[in-house]
Amino acid sequence: MSGIVVLGLQWGDEGKGKVSYILSRDADYVVRFQGGANAGHTVVLDDGRELRFNMLPAGSAAGAVPCIASGTVVDLDELEEEVNLLRSIGVYRNLLISKCANIVLPIHKSLDRALEEARGKRSVGTTGRGIGPAYSDKALRIGLRVEDVLDPEALSSRLEVLRSIHKVYGDVEGYILQKSSILRESVCDLELILNDVIDGGGKIVFEGAQGTLLDIDHGTYPYVTSSNTTIGAVSTSCGVSLRKISEIVGVMKAYTTRVGEGVFPTELKDQIGERLREVGGEYGTTTGRPRRVGWLDIPLLRYAVKINDVDWIALTKIDVLSGLDKIKICVEYEVEGSRIVLAPPRVSLLEKAKPVLIEVDGWTKLSRDEWRKISEKGVDALPENAIRYIEIVEELLGKPIKLISCGAEAGLVVWRT
Ligand code: GDP
């Protein structure tokens, strides 16, 4: 039995796409289980080709069957583009989409932008991709599901309700029908297939999008995404019991970033922050927005590790820290005279938190070729202070770091046993 979950432990952009791609190489299926085309998972192949996935799981670039589960909101334009991308690199295997997944309509995108404008100074920094409004229609039980598209009667009665509520005119039917051929080929009772695969000894990777701190219940609400990004979402969205999950992998980068608004206790607004942003290419995959950058935040990571109960950690972007003389890690917060070692991401608490930082020695800057040699030789070839940094983080979080990513390309990884 093998169900492996890949989750982000920070505010997203941790490098889940690369980790999922690596773990999907010997998987039968790879599943997106929440969110919509607001993910921005990047895979850089060893020949330098960069593949971006907003809607499909990035692991499908490794040849696993791509699946979209019921808890997602599906952007049909993106779906088409990404299926074509997989076809163009010769790895496409017939997509499977749950009948129960909801569809993002053009009206949801207009509403998303209008809502963001109406929030004014309190904007939450959405990607404007219609995700929030599509989820709210789902909760209102007026959403359009994949199965409705394939049934002309259901489609027209659903659209009638949507029209009366959103006052949408324009040719929504035409849009849906034009895009529906891909759904026709892919629609299924996904939960039954996934259960059978695991029961039959197959391997499935469940690829999370965004990160723990953006979870609609457990994140820094209201500066969060519109879905659950944490472990429970795998089960509710895919209809697969958590008992069938054999491994939970938490992905974190070696420092912290956050895109959009919201509290960020370890944010660096100085030259070091700028340097990390430039070296790390910290600009949104979907939006191009500069990401805010800060030191590693252990109190929040401890929370993410706890609520997801991760088995092991994949640490990414260790290469971005190279060349710094000293590296800081926030190990605790001071809040109104008390020390907090594990912080639930409540805005009211984080706004008062003063990071307690330790300082560790950095290591010299290494070229891509040097990182490649290190990946070939293995963990002992890592700079001594990089190993020390990894061990300190491991000790602080109480979980093993088994995979270290030291560059964007898929081959730039070091495994630790
Ligand atoms: P995701 O949304 O969690 O999949 O993360 P993104 O794909 O948005 O952001 C990660 C970015 O960092 C992508 O451009 C990756 O190609 C790149 N990346 C992933 N791992 C590493 C790494 O170890 N080092 C460097 N320098 N870049 C990495």
Image: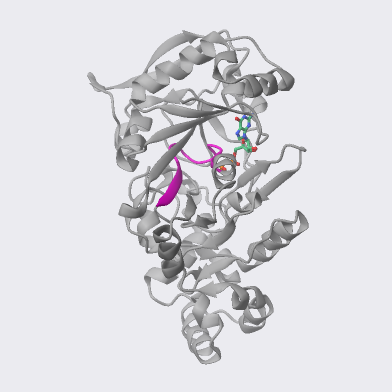
Residue 105 coordinates in the image, percent (x, y): 57, 71
**Residue 291, located in which quarter of the rendered image?**
top right
Q: Which residue lies furthest to the left in this view?
A: 338
**Residue 7, located in which quarter of the rendered image?**
top left
Q: Which residue is drawn at 38% across and 25% down?
A: 298
Q: Which residue is drawn at 74% across and 60% down?
A: 87
Asked whether residue 167 is drawn in magenta, I would say: no
Residue 330 coordinates in the image, percent (x, y): 40, 20
90 vs 282, nearest the viewer: 90
149 vs 60, nearest the viewer: 60
Q: Residue at x 68, y 66 (%)?
A: 80
Question: Where 76 sits versus 89, above or below?
Answer: below
Q: Which residue lies furthest to the front in this view?
A: 200
Question: Where 363 sits versus 283, above or below?
Answer: above
Residue 384 coordinates in the image, percent (x, y): 53, 9
Q: Quadrant of ligand 1?
A: top right
Q: Can residue 64 be seen in this view?
A: yes
Q: What stretch is highlighted in magenta?
A: 1-16
Q: Can residue 129 be seen in this view?
A: no
Question: Where 323 sits versus 223, above or below?
Answer: above
Question: Where 344 sits versus 5, above or below?
Answer: above
